[in-house]
Image (cartoon, rainbow, N blue to C red):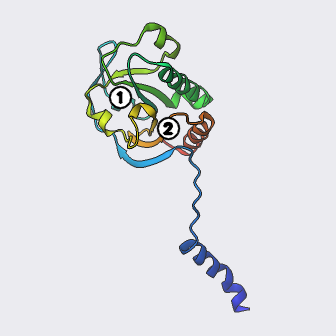
Amino acid sequence: MGALCAAPVIASYVSYYFVRPEGRTNYGELLQTRPLPEARLHLVDGSAFELSQLRGKWLLLMVDSGGCDDYCQRKLFTLRQLRLTQGKDSNRIERVWLINDDAVPSAATISPFQGTWLARAAGSDLLAQLPAEHSAAVDYIYLIDPLGNLVLRYPRGADPSGIIKDLTHLLSVSGIG
């Protein structure tokens, strides 16, 4: 009788300390959570800009040239669509394009993506702080939490449905942003 009562307790200890599940629920690559450094940037119109202006919002961030090739335009499209898929929570998400050179994006390039913050970041410490071990930062889409911490990144060719699931989950469980 004692063994029957003790079995669930013993099983819980064994499963907790010795059998660790390897599964995860996030699609993106979980990054070591750390705040991004404050960087004084400028928007393409010349006005001053800092990421801290957007504190309290989730940020979808990308890095690319102002020339914006096809891959860059696909990322911009993806960022816009990811935000729109969140419905009533879409106002909790901002999109940021860090331009890593002196090229000026054309009006035709940026007009379909109104609402995206276009910040010049060439030579900024901010670009060096974005983790991109095996490739350039332009190959990723980064997710930043409302406190300014880097949380997730998505590689080139990431499945948007996986990103949508991550965003939906984070927005539903987050009490901030």
Q: Residue at x 62, y 29 (%)?
A: 85
Q: Is residue 122 left or right of residue 134?
A: left
Numbered label attached to residue 53: 1
Q: Residue at x 41, y 21 (%)?
A: 117
Q: Nearer the viewer, mark 1 or mark 2?
A: 2
**Amino acid beneath label 1:** Gln
Residue behind mark 2: 155
- Neighbours of disc 2 within 10 Å: few (<14), some (14-19), many (20+): some
x and y percentages locating residue 46 in the rendered image: 29, 14
- Neighbours of disc 1 within 10 Å: few (<14), some (14-19), many (20+): few
Numbered label attached to residue 10: none
Image quarter for residue 67?
Answer: top left
**Amino acid beneath label 2:** Pro
Disc 1 to disc 2, C-alpha distance: 26 Å
Foreground residue among 7 and 15? 15
x and y percentages locating residue 114 in the rendered image: 49, 15
Q: Residue at x 59, y 77 (%)?
A: 14
Q: Is residue 126 left or right of residue 76?
A: left
- Circle 1/circle 2 CB separation < 8 Å: no
Q: Is residue 123 left or right of residue 28?
A: left
Q: Is residue 123 above or below residue 151?
A: above
Image quarter for residue 13?
Answer: bottom right
Foreground residue among 1 and 18? 18
Q: Is residue 31 above or below residue 120?
A: below
